[in-house]
Amino acid sequence: MIFLPRFAYALVAAILLALASPWILGGLTPAILLTLLLTGAVLADSLYIPREALQVTRHVPPILRQAQPFSVELHFTNRGENGASFQIVDSPPAAFTGERRPIALRLRRNETASRVYQLKSYRRGSFGFGAVFYRIVGPLGLIQRQGKIELPQQVEVVPDLTGEGSRDLQLALAGATRTGRRRSPRRGEGREFESLREHQHDDDFRNIDWKASAKRGQLISRHYETERDQRLMILLDTGRLMRARIGAYRKLDYAVNASVHLAQAALRKGDLVGYSIFSDEIRAYAEPRKDQLTQMVRDLTPLQPDRFDSDYATAFHQLMRKSSRRTLVVCFTDLGDAYAAQRLLAAALPLVPRHLPVIVTVSNSEILAVTKRIPETEIEVYRNVAATEMWNDYQRTLRGLRSRGILTVSVPADRLSASVINEYLRIKDTARL
């Protein structure tokens, strides 16, 4: 039972009457009468507050997209004998951001009302909505009774496959034709003959079919398409270095979204896609297949970075042991630690030349910005020197990987998905796989 301001005002009036009784005709009688009247009113208010009058239902999508806003719809019905005023608070998961204000409404008997509020989750995984708490005001407005309606509901927040990420995917897949990228001029390497067509001015002359041209009296070119059924293996590092935040996301979140978009692009191209999730041990492993996306999203949804150093040697050794065919290996990781970078290099070198490894990292634009800023104080000088050393170590690691035949992708977080897909398409077009 919760007392409201109206009760407090009446109680203060009774106390003031009691204090002023020596100067009021009748002495304490008015104060006593007011106190008795207030007590009776409270008992009546308590007696006539409807019990279990409120009925609530909640509608929320069971599958949510990371960082995409969604609506929660609440429906309220007063099943009491009389009208009543309610204050209602829902209990969404603590990790969700958005509106969390109490809902105040008055419902007549059997009246129904609805309220909608917006939420968003920057974290992936399984989350639960809890109970709906409410307070109902008595008919005289003196007290409230508090209640709870259990409404457990589980939702899954999956990697973002819509919005900007989807647009990046579409642009990257269209990039080969829209940006003038031509297919590899080499024949028989990673390409399949598709058809003959009239020669165009930007076709390579080595694709001209001279026999067909002689028969038709005009230049005819052989048209190729990139080879299908090639193998792509996505390695996703969930170690401690992937815990670092860039904006609202952690580095692992950007890597997860880019991994899913890369898998989509490869499956659309007809390739086989597999994945390995690792940190200090292998968390999940799936052989390359063409029907992989659903299971991949299911495994990536609850994924969170842990506190352990990543064991690159175990992850890469398992890949070499299980993959006899040449495979494009795309490893999403972080190179912010010099010791970890050395271990990564030692583990990745045995992949060459049988496989084609690509190391993908999110470049730290904040460190780069510090190196370009002119220091004005002693603290800023130290910060600039430390940032410069970190940036030079990072670039030195990238150069070391490239010099040993290991491809790298290092871009800011907001360009990660598109850059990785474009690198995959470039590899396909140049027949390196």
Image: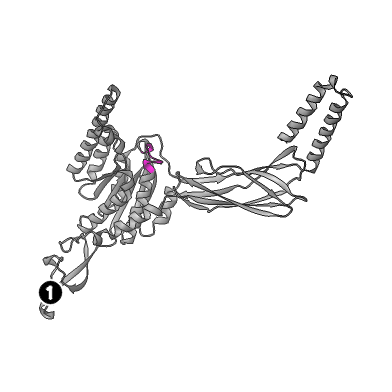
- What segment is highlighted magenta in the picture? 242-252
Specify the quadrant that holds the C terminus: bottom left
Q: Does residue 95 appear to the left or right of 272 in the view shown?
A: right
Which residue lies most toward the top here? Answer: 22
For disc 1, the marked residue is 219
Where is residue 169 drawn, in percent x and y?
Answer: 33, 56
Quarter of the picture holding the N terminus: top right
Where is residue 415 drawn, in percent x and y? 31, 48
Residue type at numbered disc 1: Leu
Can you tell which quarter of the image residue 20 is in?
Answer: top right
Does the image show residue 134? yes
How many numbered marks, from 0 up? 1
Nearest the eye: 57 or 349 = 57
> Given the current orientation, which residue lies at the most extreme right position?
26
- Is 357 rendered above or below residue 193? above
Give coordinates of residue 417: x percent, y percent. 32, 50
Residue 8 sits in quarter: top right
- In the rendered image, the vertical position of residue 302 relative to residue 377, given as above or below: below
Q: Residue at x 15, y 71 (%)?
A: 199
Q: Measured from the top left, where is residue 317 in percent x and y?
A: 29, 44
* Residue 3 seen: no
Could you tell me which secondary element the residue under label 1 belongs to?
Answer: loop
Residue 201 located left or right of residue 111 = left
